[in-house]
Amino acid sequence: MSNHELNKEWEAYEEIIDKFVQVIAKNMNLYGIAPSIGRLYGALYFAEEPMTLDDMRDVMAMSKTSMSTGVRALADMKMVEPAFKKGVRKDLYNSEEDWYKSFTTLFGSRWRHHTETNIDEAEEAIQELIMIKENTTDQILIAKIDKDIDRLKYAQNYYRWLMRFIQVVESGEIFKYVPRHDK
């Protein structure tokens, strides 16, 4: 094969990997992760060796500050981890290769915060409605408040169920019901 044909093969290969990295970024965007951070994770995932911030900057054509912020966000989500290579003084990073673990961590942290907030907001609304109810003589308003308190309690029960679901995901117990497909 000529060098020209080999270069075309490499270009085709890189285009396929780049397309899939975009898929990873879109998927992570569903969880509120910026596409640039998703692309950074994809670059680390397909890297043959651990990467420094400089390596990432070269691949991603982004500033070192952006790379640092992105790596920190990925590390917080347990999607990248520090790596060590003898003789390399700069910080190196690897992607977390276990996507099941990454999903459970990411899903849990994102959903837990919002769900806990929703439970608290519903409780606050209930308490405020009770105060209005105790201070009014308007029977139509009292009836409306009673119905809405029931709706808010229903919402709280749903959010409490969702918290149990989040715990099942975070603990890994979910894999008893929906087994992993590792191979």
Image (cartoon, rainbow, N blue to C red):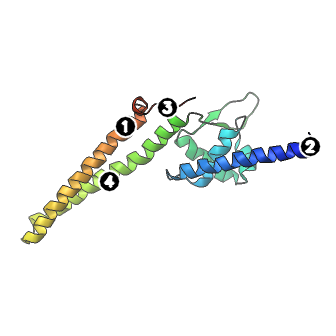
Rounded to the nearest angstrom, the CA distance separating label 4 from label 1 is 16 Å
Question: Where is mark 1, residue-wise?
Answer: 167
Residue that numbered label 2 is attached to:
3
Q: CA distance from mark 4 to mark 3?
A: 30 Å
Tag 4: amino acid:
Asn
The amino acid type found where label 3 is placed reads Arg
Alpha-carbon span between mark 2 and mark 4: 60 Å
- The residues bearing labels 2 and 3 have C-alpha atoms spaced at a distance of 42 Å
Q: Earlier in the sequence, mark 2 or mark 3?
A: 2
Front disc: 1 or 2: 2
* Residue on which the image places disc 3: 180
Q: Nearer the viewer, mark 4 or mark 3?
A: 3
Q: Amino acid at mark 1?
A: Gln
Residue 127 can be seen in this image: no
Whichever of labels 4 and 1 marks the residue nearer the N terminus, that label is 4
Name the residue rendered at 65%, 47% in the picture.
Answer: 21
Q: Is residue 47 left or right of residue 182?
A: right
**Circles 3 and 1 in contact, beta carbons < 8 Å:** no
Image coords of residue 39 (percent x, y): 64, 49
Q: Tell me which numbered mark, 1 or 2, is placed earlier along the sequence.
A: 2
Q: Residues within 10 Å of mark 1 (few under 14, many from 20)?
A: some
Q: Which of the two discs, 4 and 3, labels the residue nearer the N terminus?
A: 4
Which residue corresponds to mark 4? 118
* Quadrant where the image shows the N terminus: top right
Label 3 environment density (alpha carbons within 10 Å; few <14, some 14–19, many ≥20): few
Picture layout, residue 176 above or below residue 58:
above
Would you say residue 146 is visible in this rendering? yes
